[in-house]
Image: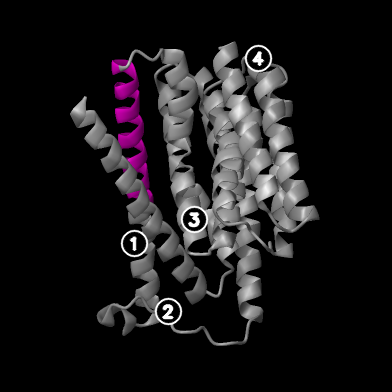
Amino acid sequence: MLIEVLLFFTGLLLLYVGAELLVGASSRIALLLKVAPIVVGLTVVAFGTSSPEFLVSFMAALRGQIDVAVGNIVGSNIANIGLVLAFSTLLRPIRKVLANIKDELIWVVAATGLFWFFASDLVIVWYEGALLTAGIVIFTSILIRQSIRDRKSLSEEVPPVNVGWAWLDGQKDFIKILIFSIGVIAGIAVLAWGSRLTIDSAVTIAEHLGISQIVIGLTMVAFGTSLPELATGIISVIKKENEILVGNVIGSNLFNILGVAGPIALFFRIPVKEHALVFDFPVMVVFTLFLVVALWGFKSLNRLFAFLFFGGYLAYIYYTIVSG
């Protein structure tokens, strides 16, 4: 028991270190490439922090537990908004969101609606998976192309990107980008390691305390796959990198649907439980629509929105546990 507690706190420490690496390196790459931080959040950071969802869902499919995939994806998307974004915003409200995020909001609403539509017959099959997979390819391609175009239109010089390490600060931009890219990869790896260590030790502790498997599955496992996003969100807030935070949440939700459910459905028929279709999917849609209203209509997220999202998430978890 003592060892598991130590492993739990070690996992939390690794989450902090991984998030620090990922956010710090990503923001510096954005500066060096003249790319908006929100683009980095929508792509590199989002895809990296969503890797646990992909690994958990894919491994579950290989083990014949394919029904876990949908619950993991839907639950993670709800947690990204109701837990990650809400908790981070409670710490520091997001005063301004760039107008160019509107296209990404349309994408996330369309992907969420399409995912629900494909699940309406209680199964997601290969050709639906192919459409979802094509969606993430198209979205990423458009984002990269737009970033290149915007970068070429900028005429101002990039300010020095220094880290306080004399050797690195004296290198050319190409070397800096290469090293920061290694930092991004290392950050993602440490996040994945930390989240796995944290959730495994938490489950063991819960079992020692006599907590039921259903409660463990509905709370700790769902929470565990969102730990990378949560850690990254908190660090982004501390560093005042609000664009990376927002981009991470929107990009993670998009990737969970298009880049996780899509590829898995190409190889496995994904069954959808009726309870998930009539309850969990609508909750995910409502959370997504409210996020769009906040970011598009008000161009900000204050503590009131954060409180509503967080309260809604706690109510969702409570109902899920009680009804389960």
- Residue at image position (52%, 58%) is 237
**Residue 324 seen in this snapshot:** yes
From mark 4 to mark 3, how far is it between C-alphas? 33 Å
Disc marking residue 182: 1
3D distance between C-alphas at marks 2 and 4: 51 Å
Which SS type dominates the magenta stretch? helix
Q: Position of residue 248 (x, y in %)?
A: 55, 52
Disc 3 or 1, which lies upstream in sequence?
Answer: 3
In terms of sequence position, does the residue under pointer 2 or pointer 3 come before the other? 3
Q: Residue 12's quadrant in the figure?
A: top left
Q: Nearer the viewer, residue 111 or 225?
A: 225
The verdict on residue 254 being magenta is no
Q: Which residues are magenta?
A: 188-208
Residue 236 locus on image (x, y percent): 49, 58
Q: Quadrant of the N terminus?
A: top left
Distance from label 1 to label 4 (Cα)? 43 Å
Question: Tag on residue 27?
Answer: none
Q: Residues within 10 Å of mark 1 (few under 14, many from 20)?
A: some
Q: Residue at x 75, y 40 (%)?
A: 289
Query: What amino acid type should be assigned to the residue bearing mark 2?
Result: Val
What element does badge 2 sit on?
loop
Residue 275 — which label?
A: 4
Q: Quadrant of the C terminus?
A: top right
Question: To which residue does mark 3 refer?
Answer: 44
**Residue 106 visible here:** no
Real-space Cα distance between discs 3 and 1? 12 Å
SS of the residue at dot 1? helix
